[in-house]
Structures are given as C-alpha cells and as structure tokens.
C-alpha cells in the first residue's frame, strides 16, 4: 500500500484516483469542487481539506489539472512547500512543454523526483484503468513512475527527459487532428464522386491511405467499427480538447521554430468548428462541416 495524494478529480482525475483506491492504495484526494471530492470519497478516497493537507504524508503525488497555469500555481504555492522531499511527483495534465520543464526544474532544485506523464485515452480509459502514459523524466526515476501509474495504465512509455512526455502528447495529437481531417475530406470527396462510403472504407483500409482515424475511428456512421459517429458524435474526444492540444502544438512549434502548416490548418478548422457551437461534439464530427451538413448535427 502506497500513500498517494491525488489533486484534480475532474472527468479524468476522478476515475484515475478511483483506480488507485481500488488497487488498495491510501488516496488523499483534493479538488476545488466539493462535488468532485464527494465522488472521489464514494470511490474509496479520503477527502483532504487542501492540497497542502493531501500531500503532507504522501509518498506519491499525482496531479490532473486543466492547464499549465494551474499546474505552475499548484506546484509552486502548495505542493513543493508542503510535500516530503522523498515524495515522487507526477503531473498527468496535458500542458505546454515550457510549463512542464519549468515545474520539473523547480521540483528538482528542491530535491524532489518529478515526471510529466500526460495520457492518451479519454474518460472511458481513465475509468477503466487503461490509459497510455507518455513520461518525461530522468532515466533512473522511470521505474518508480511506471510502478506508481500501473493501476491506471494499459501502457507506460518513457519518452525522454523532462517535458518529453508533453512533447510526445502534442505531436501525437497534432498528427491525429491532421489525419482525421484528411480522412473526413476523403469521405466528403468520395461522396461527391458517387463512391459509396463503405466501399471507400474497404479499399482505403487496405491501401496506402490506411490510418487509425480511418480504420479504428471512422467518422462516417455505420462504416467500420463502432465509433462516436454511430452515436451522434457524443462522447469520445471532444472538439474543445482537440483544439486545446492543437493550440499547444502550434505554440510549441512557434517557440521551437518548427514548420507545421498542416497543424496550423487543423487548428484553424477545429477553431472554426468549435466557434460554430460544436465544442462538445467528438472531433470526428468535423466531417459534417466539410460535407456542408452542419444541420445534421443535433
Ligand atoms: P476537468 O476540468 O474535468 O478536471 C480538472 C479538475 O481540476 C476540476 O475538477 C477542477 O476543479 C480541478 N482543479 C482546478 N484547479 C485546481 C486547484 N488549484 N486545486 C485542486 N483542483 C483544481 O478536466 P479533465 O477532462 O479531467 O482533464 C484534465 C487534464 O487531462 C487536462 O489537462 C486535459 O487536457 C487532460 N486530458 C483530458 C482528456 C479528456 O478526454 N477529458 C483526455 C486526455 C487528457
């Protein structure tokens, strides 16, 4: 049994903390939202009154917060001044690479072990304990990080030094956004050319256009395996989340001097779709915008 502090019990953190409690760890949980905290308690966690109280006795501290500004503030003001120096600190939020590296530097300067460990997989994977973690940390810290994440994970991969987990996450999601838009455009063109969606799926799945967005997450209802398209684009990976990750990728590209015009185009298209009122729809629903059929979306 490990004493774990879990900070941030929202859509993702709630299920993740529950899986740590299910694995018989002692989880001291904290969230600004009383409702989120209550849900964590009913899943077997203990409620802490503050971040400081949650982390004071912890051997492992896990954070799952909205963005870089929250992570910087919670670590600087509450975790680093109150946690024991031998505690292992793991931030699982999706944030900018710069903030991840800054927080890692502060933590290491104070003698802590720190890892950035963003996840792939949505709330269903968080609830089921089947998330994929991409980890940025020193090589000699990785084994402890892997063990701490195990109750929440399908796979834990060491991406490299501090910030590498966040870098892997935004590069992967930029690729996903671009490939989904490519798949959507191809189906929209196929339709205009009178090609049946199912026939096109069968052919492209076995040809050089094959990719995950096509074969595992097809944006056309009734084609391929069950996906959010088959339930009105509800659930899945929300457009707002994809847009957040595309913005992080563009921000990182600008700072690093990388040329990412397809990523920029994907950000612009998802910003348009989000602005039209579809932030909560699965990101594959963007096909209806490209087909000129937004009215089909409830
Ligand atoms: P969420 O908004 O549901 O949860 C965030 C929680 O953090 C909220 O409950 C909020 O009250 C809490 N919080 C904010 N500031 C706090 C503070 N100072 N102290 C304590 N608690 C605080 O968000 P989410 O969907 O759970 O996402 C969390 C992170 O995971 C984000 O970085 C997101 O990009 C990433 N992510 C989300 C998904 C997804 O499908 N939802 C998938 C992969 C990664």
Image (spheres, helix red, strand yellow):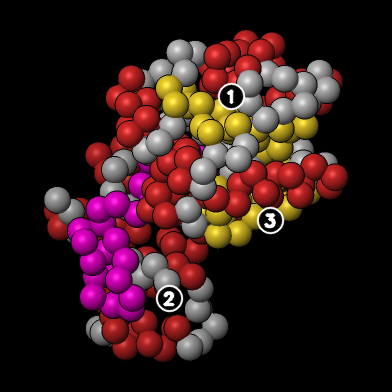
Q: Is residue 13 left or right of residue 136?
A: left
Q: Residue at x 60, y 52 (%)?
A: 150
Q: Distance between the residues labelled 2 and 1?
A: 36 Å
Mark 3 sits on what residue? 157
Q: Position of residue 132 (x, y in %)?
A: 56, 55
Mark 2 sits on what residue? 215
Q: Do we see residue 122 in this rendering?
A: no
Q: Quadrant of ligand 1?
A: top left
Q: Residue at x 50, y 87 (%)?
A: 207
Residue 110, relative to residue 162: is it above or below? above
Q: Residue at x 40, y 49 (%)?
A: 127
Residue 125, relative to residue 114: is it above or below? below
Indicate the secondary structure of the residue bearing disc 2. helix
267 inside magenta stretch: no
Residue 71 badge: 1
The stretch in magenta equals: 220-248
- Density class for disc 3 (Cα within 10 Å; few <14, some 14-19, many ≥20) is some
Q: Do we see residue 151 in this rendering?
A: yes
- The verdict on label 1 being within 8 Å of ligand 1 is no
Q: How far apart are marks 3 and 1 (CA)?
A: 22 Å
Q: How far apart are marks 3 and 2 (CA)?
A: 24 Å
């Amino acid at each position: 049994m490990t004493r774990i502090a879990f900070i941030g019990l929202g859509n993702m953190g709630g299920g993740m903390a529950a899986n740590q409690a299910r694995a018989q760890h002692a989880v001291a949980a904290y969230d600004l939202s009383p409702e989120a905290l209550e849900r964590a308690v009913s899943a077997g966690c203990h409620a802490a009154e503050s971040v400081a109280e949650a982390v004071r006795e912890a051997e492992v501290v896990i954070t799952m917060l909205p963005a870089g500004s929250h992570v910087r503030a919670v670590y600087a003001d509450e975790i680093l001044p109150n946690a024991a120096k031998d505690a292992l600190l793991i931030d699982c939020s999706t944030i900018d690479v710069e903030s991840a590296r800054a927080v890692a530097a502060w933590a290491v300067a104070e003698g802590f072990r720190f890892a950035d460990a963003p996840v792939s997989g949505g709330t269903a994977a968080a609830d089921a304990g089947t998330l994929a973690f991409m980890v940025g940390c020193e090589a000699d810290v990785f084994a402890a990080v892997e063990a701490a994440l195990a109750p929440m994970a399908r796979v834990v991969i060491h991406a490299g030094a501090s910030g590498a987990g966040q870098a892997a996450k935004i590069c992967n999601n930029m690729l996903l956004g671009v490939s989904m838009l490519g798949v959507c455009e191809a189906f929209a063109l196929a339709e205009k050319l009178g090609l049946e969606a199912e026939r096109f799926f069968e052919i492209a799945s076995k040809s050089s256009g094959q990719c995950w967005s096509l074969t595992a997450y097809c944006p056309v209802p009734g084609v391929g395996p069950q996906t959010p398209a088959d339930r009105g684009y509800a659930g899945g990976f929300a457009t707002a989340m994809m847009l957040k990750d595309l913005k992080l990728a563009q921000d990182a590209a600008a700072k690093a001097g990388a040329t990412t015009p397809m990523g920029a185009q994907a950000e612009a298209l998802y910003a348009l779709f989000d602005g039209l009122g579809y932030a909560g729809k699965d990101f594959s629903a963007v096909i209806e915008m490209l087909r000129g059929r937004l009215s089909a979306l409830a």
